[in-house]
């Protein structure tokens, strides 16, 4: 009897501990995942690129009253792509956690340095993380979308990564510039003879996923310049650093690019801090898909993401809401094992809370976001009108009561979610 009790206690400890996350996977799929969350038909390759954006403003070393210093800005990018390989799976080594010190290994479906699949150019998706973050924070999107016929480029934004997070003005200035630069670089690689991406990318059909500060950058990339008042606020715009991003300015116009066809903004930061005017948001004319938790305490919901959704009046747009979800809704990968045990900051694991939500299971949110992002990008970037059935809900009668039917979801597995849509005026 004592032996049996010890076995039971051991099992309870095992399944209630971080050991359940020991594989640190980014490609998890719950049994109740919606239909389009499942991986697509393509095997996946992944490579790391080291890029240099020459002669950029060095926002960290600005001296008040002096000309802007310039430097060659390094950017590391993780690229996922459809691959010609018999293999499945690999490791992402030495990935930093939120503390900027702890390094971990993550595991997924992609094969490192696999040979790209020939014969077709695929739409491009650019991923832009939060502050701080890194190129792996939303790597679940990277693998998932590559398996469905996309080239996906996820950026390490210099001065915004866990290990090098610097003063905030650098993030505010560089986000849209980094996003545009990566689009230009991917276009260059597509035309570069002998490059592994030669003739593999259709950059004329590009989507962008931005989370938090990446969402801030995505709004600027989509057309919403910042207000003049923000650009004249020294704390965020020393020496007028953000003047180039002012709404309706010629300099902001040069950042806009018709190759960006579809934007996903997850908990975009800035609305509660008066970064945009109604006119600035009205300048967005690209399709948008917003994702947010209803109690987001970083970017805001009613006065944040939802208000942006309402004010981008010239965009056809969606808003997916996780009821009672906070700022981490949908975007970050599930917390790696080491994040469960990295205890600091007065005995609390900031690393763990960075990847989790108090109410929602992170993998569940990842799968739901993968489902809707798949439908949205397939509709806009691949002109697959069949995806409308996953985005437009039908009403049916169940036991005499009218109920909205969400295609791709099991019965009642859409509880706690709302999806809204508004046409451009």
Image (cartoon, rainbow, N blue to C red):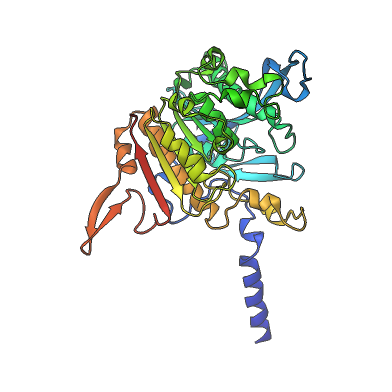
Q: Give the farthest residue toward the bottom.
A: 1
Please state which of residues 338 and 395 is positioned toward the viewer in this rendering.
395
Which residue occupies 75% across, 13% down?
67
Please state which of residues 225 and 171 is positioned toward the viewer in this rendering.
225
Q: Could you tell me residue 140's position as x and y percent? A: 54, 42
User: How many numbered marks does the figure carry?
Assistant: 0
Which residue occupies 65% across, 60% down?
19
Locate the C terminus by quadrant.
top left
Q: Could you tell me residue 219's position as x and y percent? A: 51, 29
Q: Could you tell me residue 112's position as x and y percent? A: 61, 34
Residue 4 in sight in this render: yes
46 vs 35, left or right, is right
Please state which of residues 174 and 46 is positioned toward the viewer in this rendering.
174
Which residue occupies 58% across, 22% down?
228
Q: Is residue 33 above or below residue 94?
A: below
Q: Quadrant of residue 138?
A: top right
Q: Could you tell me residue 71's position as x and y percent? A: 74, 17
Residue 49 in sight in this render: no
321 vs 58, left or right, is left
Locate the N terminus by quadrant.
bottom right
Q: Is residue 203 above or below residue 16?
A: above
């Amino acid at each position: 009897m004592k032996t049996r009790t010890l076995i039971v206690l051991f099992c309870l400890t095992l399944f209630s501990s971080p050991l359940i996350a020991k594989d640190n996977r980014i490609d998890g799929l719950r049994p109740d995942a919606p239909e389009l969350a499942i991986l697509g038909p393509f095997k996946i390759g992944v490579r790391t690129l080291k890029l240099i954006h020459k002669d950029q403003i060095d926002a960290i070393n600005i001296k008040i009253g002096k000309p802007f210093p310039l430097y060659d800005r390094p950017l590391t990018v993780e690229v996922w792509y459809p691959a010609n390989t018999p293999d499945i799976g690999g490791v992402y080594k030495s990935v930093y956690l939120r503390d900027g010190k702890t390094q971990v290994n993550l595991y997924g479906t992609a094969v490192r340095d696999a040979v790209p699949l020939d014969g077709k150019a695929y739409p491009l998706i650019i991923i832009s993380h939060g502050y701080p973050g890194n190129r792996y924070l939303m790597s679940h999107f990277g693998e998932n979308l590559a398996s469905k016929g996309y080239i996906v480029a996820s950026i390490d934004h210099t001065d915004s990564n866990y290990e090098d997070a610097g003063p905030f003005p650098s993030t505010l200035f560089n986000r849209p510039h980094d996003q545009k630069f990566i689009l230009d670089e991917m276009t260059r690689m597509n035309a570069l003879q002998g490059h592994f991406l030669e003739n593999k990318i259709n950059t004329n059909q590009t989507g962008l996923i931005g989370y938090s500060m990446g969402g801030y950058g995505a709004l600027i990339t989509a057309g919403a310049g910042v207000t003049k008042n923000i650009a004249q606020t020294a704390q965020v715009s020393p020496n007028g650093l953000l003047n180039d991003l002012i709404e309706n300015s010629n300099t902001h116009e040069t950042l806009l690019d018709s190759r960006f066809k579809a934007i996903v903004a997850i908990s975009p930061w800035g609305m509660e801090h008066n970064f945009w005017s109604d006119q600035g948001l009205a300048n967005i004319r690209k399709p948008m898909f917003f994702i947010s938790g209803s109690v987001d305490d970083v970017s805001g919901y009613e006065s944040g993401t939802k208000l942006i959704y309402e004010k981008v009046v010239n965009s056809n747009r969606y808003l997916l809401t996780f009821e009672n979800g906070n700022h981490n809704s949908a975007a970050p990968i599930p917390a790696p094992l080491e994040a469960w045990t990295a205890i600091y900051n007065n005995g609390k694991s900031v690393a763990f809370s960075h990847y989790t939500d108090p109410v929602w299971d992170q993998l569940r949110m990842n799968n739901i976001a993968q489902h809707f992002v798949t439908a949205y990008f397939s509709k806009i970037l691949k002109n697959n009108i069949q995806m409308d059935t996953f985005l437009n809900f039908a009403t049916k009668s169940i036991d005499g009561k009218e109920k909205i039917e969400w295609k791709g979801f099991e019965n009642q597995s859409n509880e706690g979610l709302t999806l809204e849509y508004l046409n451009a005026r």
